[in-house]
Amino acid sequence: MIKTYEEINEKIKKGNSIVLTAEEMIEYVEENGTKVAAEEIDVVTTGTFGPMCSSGAFLNFGHSDPPIKFDHLWLNDVHAYHGNAAVDGYIGVTRMADKRPYEYGGGHVIEDLVSGKEVRLRGISDTTDCYPLDEVDTNIKIDDLNQAILCNPRNAYQKYSCAVNSTDKTIYTYMGKLLPNFGNAHYSGSGCLNPLTNDPDYETIGIGTRIFLGGGIGYVIGEGTQHNPTEGYGTLFVKGDLKQMKQKYLKGAKFEKYGVSMFCGVGIPIPILNEKLAKKTAVKDEDISTSVVDYGIPRRERPKIRETNYKELKSGFIEINGKNVKCSSMSSLFYAREIAEELKNWIQKGEFYLNPPAEKLSLRKIFKPMKQTSKLRFVKDLKRKATICYEDCDIKDVAEKIIEQNMNHIIITDHNNKLKGIVTSFDITKAIGKDKSKLRQIITKKVITTSDNEPIKIAARKMKLNDISALPVVDDNNRVRGIITSEDLM
Amino acid sequence: MGILDLTFPRNEFKGLDDYEKIINHILKLDVPFTILKFNLNESGIAVKLDVPTEKVSQVTQTLEKAGIKIKRQVIEIDEELCIDCGQCIALCNTGALCFDEDSKLKFCEDKCVGCHLCVDACPRQAIKY
């Protein structure tokens, strides 16, 4: 070991510590090598500022008179969690407001509290002998609370995958709006500035590590939920005093047709205790690989399109199937830099000291999928034989088939069984009413389809969203393999 | 959906043939559109079209090439709300939204065609028009 925490803290105290941000460290190591860097540099600061959905705050409101034990409580119309003692509550950032969902949520409540705004607190209770009050409706500010503790079960992903959409429809996800046919790509994280990326063996970041959190001081209190170190997707469980934090680094967010969240600023200092840490903190964007993942396939294992790295992602374009696809970030690199820079200033000014972790984070934890006791059913399990007419037949043939086979949907194909459209019994009625005789005048050409291996629930959602009652089942070559109707799903 | 305010200039479009050419031009793009308004004024024929948001820039380019004037409803960025995440950048087809050298969001108004694809996608509701 070249340096100890005590030696580094002694230098911080004297005001002569040498601190670099993780970006500056890259250049320093390139010029001077890891040996010199390990001797000269005391601390490397990191930073990230992105939407962190697993975030929220514990709040204690103090007791009312007469006292109340909340059964339900709302802050600015956002339902908070109440499963603790009488006047404790937890406001989660992804909870949407009852009246303005998709626009305002728990993250916005936290932002409003931190910026000193008044927040409406409403609570109801069944009443007890010791907590007789049934209702509270009041306005509070952060200073009126006893405790306001930001407590985030999963923050600061070591890295994240890049999201694209292969389907022919725009999809709305927690990775933002993804345009059809690989129309854009979204990634998250600050790459070489990401905290855990700079300490991938969790040598210095562990339980008890003092960090920058939301503009104030926070602590790592454990591995984050879904901590997945074996695949390089480590996460952190963090907490800090919300009362010290700044609105600049906690920003409520909404994602179009998806929901709400909060951007949270996290910065972690890494003490350069040895040469290996000097090398690790000089990690470059091109060395941090991640996958481009197709969010168009709504399954747990989304198809990986290719591997990429943060250098390519930050360039603004990634190549997919020979096409240059515009790529941008969910998180803010500008703010990530500000965080690393601010933490650096705190240390240089002697306002922030480093401490060794009380316990290390797991390097071996496996991220398990959910155990589901009911069997997943697929389209192939419930589909039936489709009634098919060729595109060149006439309306009368179609009408006959509808009567003969008692089917509401007739699938139209070419002679090679390739899907060309769909006709319903209503379309036939309309054709007769409006005196149309050609099949192509009434056929619906843009058909929403499903496939054998699509889960039933996803096929059902397609029908619901598009307000239709049947989906042709097609194979990869658009050949018709059957039909599934809403009646089959009952 | 994106709203396009078009004017077919009075002097350049005279006969029915000219209008037909233009409409055929749009039809060739295979873009469904709704005509919301169609009226005559001193500068020509004013038409309001509603086209799918992701097709706005394509339609705009085609029409501008044909000499049709398009009143663009360009966006505005509220810098107080913007956090420079850049989510809007990959949605912007014309490069009107990009990063400057400090990774701060830069908006070039002259490149904005008013497709508004970015407006609802902004997590901070910082984009308005």
Image: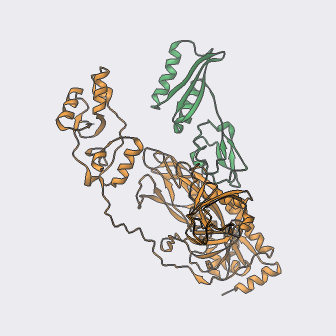
Residue A95 location in percent, x, y? Answer: 56, 58
Vertical side of A391 occupied by A289: above or below: below
Please state which of residues A469 and A294 is positioned toward the viewer in this rendering: A469
Where is residue A449, by image quadrant? top left
Residue B76 location in percent, x, y? Answer: 69, 41
Vertical side of A279 occupied by A488: above or below: above
Q: Residue furthest right?
A: A14
Residue A332 location in percent, x, y? Answer: 64, 57
Q: Residue furthest left?
A: A404
Lateral position of residue A277 relative to residue A480, left or right: right
Q: In percent of the image, x 72 and y 77: which residue is there? A: A41
Please state which of residues A348 and B95 is positioned toward the viewer in this rendering: A348
Residue B47 location in percent, x, y? Answer: 57, 23
Vertical side of B79 occupied by A268: above or below: below
- Which chain is displayed in green in the rendered image? B
- Which chain is displayed in orange in the rendered image? A
Where is residue B57, by image quadrant? top right
